[in-house]
């Protein structure tokens, strides 16, 4: 906390004192709008032709992966790098400029039509974030954390491919590009989750520290990185038909072995912990179901995918931003009943979009609408409750 001049810090408006503040708040609020529009789209009762970039399926995939999840990842990493390195994180005008490009892109892609201008605007904020993430890591030579910056640049590359599809340039396929993007985000979630969930569980339950077993950690991470390489590199289809389900299954199984050591039942009285565990379990189930889909086509692609997106990434994000926002603003790690209700609403959203749709296919469209509405309710509660937390100075008067 001594790495900043507090007098200069007080001259920065609180919302731009660290990256988690604007990105957590705005991404959550934006996801409420995005999911309400998605519910209206599937209800079929509203003409949305002037919105969603003229292509609702493209827009939903892109905006939930980049506009929502990408923003939260950037906000988290640009905040965490200050703790990792001891160097000040990006703040003030520089942070505001990154955020402004993100915001302009969200507005443009919501109300505009496919355009090179909107593409350029949307391609600026992530490389800027990667630069400000990598800079203190280079200064401190913390090479073990450097890989996050190339992953952000990799997401930028996939963002380019998304936009080229919208512009009708090249031969890009929406499903394949969105799957690549999802796998990049999934690896980030598995890496970060594997680092913080055992630590948070140990500290939050006052139990014995959860040790790391080297072969389990390697077993969880190596298949994840190989899976990412398999998805991103031009692996011959004849080979990928075998390697993709094997790597998905290995990633799921080894992360399950990792997960069962984290004493999930000890977290049942602590919402900030049990939602993290729920999210990680859904990531694992999603990986295993995708393996089944690609191997035997016995599970629908969309259902398997949404185990990861809604249950895994969505719930992980909610749990992380709720906790990080409290810790980095000098507050105790306690949430009220309304936030518990938000957690439960998001879990219900995940279960309806996956388990209910899987078991009751005739309810598919209703399931889509109800799930989207529950997501919107969950993140609206977060946005309302955390708005004063994220827009006011720390309670202890310290920087950040």
Image (tube, rainbow, N blue to C red):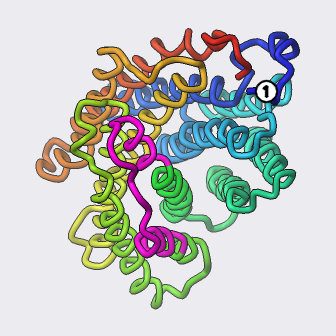
**Front residue of this view, candidates 295 and 384:** 384
> Up-down: is 295 above or below 64?
below
Tell me residue 245's x, y (percent).
Answer: 37, 77
> How many numbered dots are placed on residues in this image?
1
In the image: residue 125, left or right of residue 43:
right
Q: Which residue is mark 1?
A: 2
Placement of the C terminus among the 4 image quadrants: top right
Q: Which residues are magenta?
A: 196-225
Tell me residue 343's x, y (percent).
Answer: 32, 29
Tell me residue 329's x, y (percent).
Answer: 60, 19
Tell me residue 48's x, y (percent).
Answer: 47, 28
> Up-down: is 285 above or below 363?
below
Please tell me in which quadrant of the rendered image residue 377 appears: top left
Task: Say if the magenta span includes residue 27.
Answer: no
Which residue lies at the image location 46% right of the left edge and 55% below the top edge?
A: 194
Please tell me in which quadrant of the rendered image residue 339 appears: top left
> Up-down: is 290 above or below 86?
below
Task: Assign a secondary structure to mark 1.
Answer: loop
In the image: residue 228, left or right of residue 212:
right
In the image as oriented, which residue stretches furthest toward the bottom? 238
**Chief secondary structure of the magenta portion:** helix
In the image: residue 163, left or right of residue 65:
right
């Amino acid at each position: 906390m001594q790495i900043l001049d507090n007098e200069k810090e007080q001259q920065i408006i609180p919302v731009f004192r660290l990256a988690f503040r604007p990105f957590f708040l705005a991404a959550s609020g934006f996801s409420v709008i995005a999911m309400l529009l998605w519910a209206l789209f599937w209800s079929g009762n509203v003409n949305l032709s002037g919105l969603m970039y003229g292509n609702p399926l493209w827009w939903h995939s892109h905006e939930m992966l980049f506009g929502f999840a990408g923003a939260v990842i950037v906000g988290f990493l640009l905040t965490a790098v200050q703790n990792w390195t001891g160097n000040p994180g990006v703040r003030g005008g520089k942070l505001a400029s990154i955020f402004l490009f993100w915001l302009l892109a969200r507005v443009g892609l919501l109300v505009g039509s496919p355009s090179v201008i909107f593409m350029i605007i949307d391609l600026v904020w992530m490389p800027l974030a990667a630069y400000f993430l990598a800079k203190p890591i280079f200064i401190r030579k913390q090479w073990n954390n450097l890989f996050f910056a190339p992953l952000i640049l990799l997401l930028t590359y996939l963002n380019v491919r998304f936009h080229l599809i919208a512009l009708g340039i090249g031969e890009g396929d929406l499903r394949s590009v969105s799957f690549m993007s999802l796998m990049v985000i999934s690896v980030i979630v598995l890496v970060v989750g594997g680092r913080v969930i055992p630590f948070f569980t140990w500290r939050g339950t006052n139990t014995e520290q959860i040790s790391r077993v080297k072969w389990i950690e390697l077993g969880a991470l190596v298949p994840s990185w190989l899976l990412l390489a398999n998805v991103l590199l031009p692996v011959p289809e004849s080979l990928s038909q075998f390697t993709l389900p094997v790597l998905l299954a290995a990633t799921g199984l080894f992360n399950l072995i990792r997960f069962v050591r984290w004493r999930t039942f000890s977290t049942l009285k602590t919402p900030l912990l049990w939602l993290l565990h729920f999210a990680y379990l859904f990531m694992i189930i999603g990986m295993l179901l995708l393996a089944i889909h690609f191997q035997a086509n016995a599970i629908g692609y969309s259902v398997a995918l949404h185990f990861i997106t809604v249950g895994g990434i969505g719930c992980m994000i909610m749990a992380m931003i709720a906790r990080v926002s409290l810790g980095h603003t000098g507050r105790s790690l306690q949430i009220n009943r309304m936030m518990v209700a938000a957690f439960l609403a998001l879990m219900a959203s995940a279960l309806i979009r996956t388990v209910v749709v899987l078991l009751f296919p005739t309810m598919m469209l209703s399931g889509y609408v109800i799930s989207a509405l529950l997501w919107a309710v969950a993140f609206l509660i977060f946005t309302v409750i955390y708005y004063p937390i994220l827009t006011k100075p720390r309670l202890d008067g310290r920087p950040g």
